[in-house]
Image: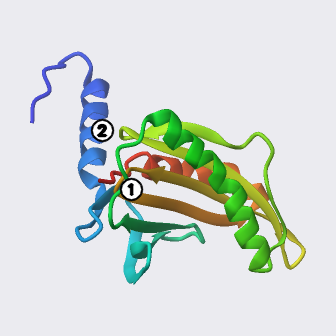
Amino acid sequence: MRCGFTKTPFTCSLVLVAVAFAYSQNVYQDSESRVALSLPPGWTWTGPSRWADEKGAKSISVLKEAGTTHELRLWIQNLDPPETTTPADKMDRRLLKLPQRKIEQRTREGYQNYRLREGSCELHPINGRSALTWVADYTDRGQHMVEYWTIVRSENTHALLYGRVPAEQLDDFRARVNPIIETLQIR
């Protein structure tokens, strides 16, 4: 393949590396819940496990990075019936209530010292959908742990991505999983 950059072979090499990376992505698709995301090389998934309740069909898949303990869980709820079209500001208000509900749930489940990290809530769009990311701190067998959360919502689908790591690994974990989270597409 000829790049046309005869005086800059380095530039040509960079273009080839970028193209190779783009095509090496592993795409996770769940045709039943109509959810998709891209995984970088070294990441795999298992699932989905499916069930249904009075609120609709649900599934969970586990995304794992080879050679590390990093794991990202993808929980999906398909709403049946779908909600009516919701303005973005109303959807954002709904999203901002979720961390407190999760704190209450985790406390009932027995997580020690489970609490929302102050200043960690961030509203942002992901592929045109409303999303909220936050961090929760807790203690597990004397170790300071965090749960890193992102929820993406539409009128049809709620998607939660979350992972648990020792608190000192949060920055590295975020750097590894945020590029995956940003590729999430829901219907």
Question: Which quadrant would the N terminus be assigned to in this image?
Answer: top left
Which class describes the residues within 10 Å of circle 2: few (<14), some (14-19), or many (20+)? Answer: few
Q: Tell me what residue is drawn at x 39 percent, y 70 percent.
A: 44
Marks 1/2: CA–CA distance: 13 Å
- Residue assigned mark 2: 18
Q: Tell me what residue is drawn at x 86 percent, y 79 percent.
A: 141
What residue type is disc 1 on? Pro
Number of numbered callouts drawn: 2
Front-most of residues 131 and 54:
54
Image quadrant assignment for residue 169: bottom right
Residue 43 in view here = no
Which class describes the residues within 10 Å of circle 1: few (<14), some (14-19), or many (20+)? Answer: some
Q: Tell me what residue is drawn at x 42 percent, y 67 percent.
A: 76
Q: Which one is earlier in the sequence, the residue at label 1 or at label 2?
A: 2
**Residue 113, image x and y in percent?**
87, 67
**Residue 71, image x and y in percent?**
55, 69
Front-most of residues 138 and 13:
138
**Residue 22, image x and y in percent?**
27, 45
Dot 1: element: loop
Query: Could you say which disc has been placed on residue 9 in the image?
Result: none
Residue 23 in view here = yes
Q: Tell me what residue is drawn at x 71 percent, y 71 percent.
A: 105
Image quadrant assignment for residue 40: bottom left
Q: Is residue 34 left or right of residue 105?
A: left
- Mark 1 or 2: the one toward you: 1
Query: Could you say which disc has been placed on residue 40 in the image?
Result: 1
Front-most of residues 74 and 18:
74
Dot 2: element: helix
What residue type is disc 2 on? Ala
**Residue 119, image x and y in percent?**
76, 39
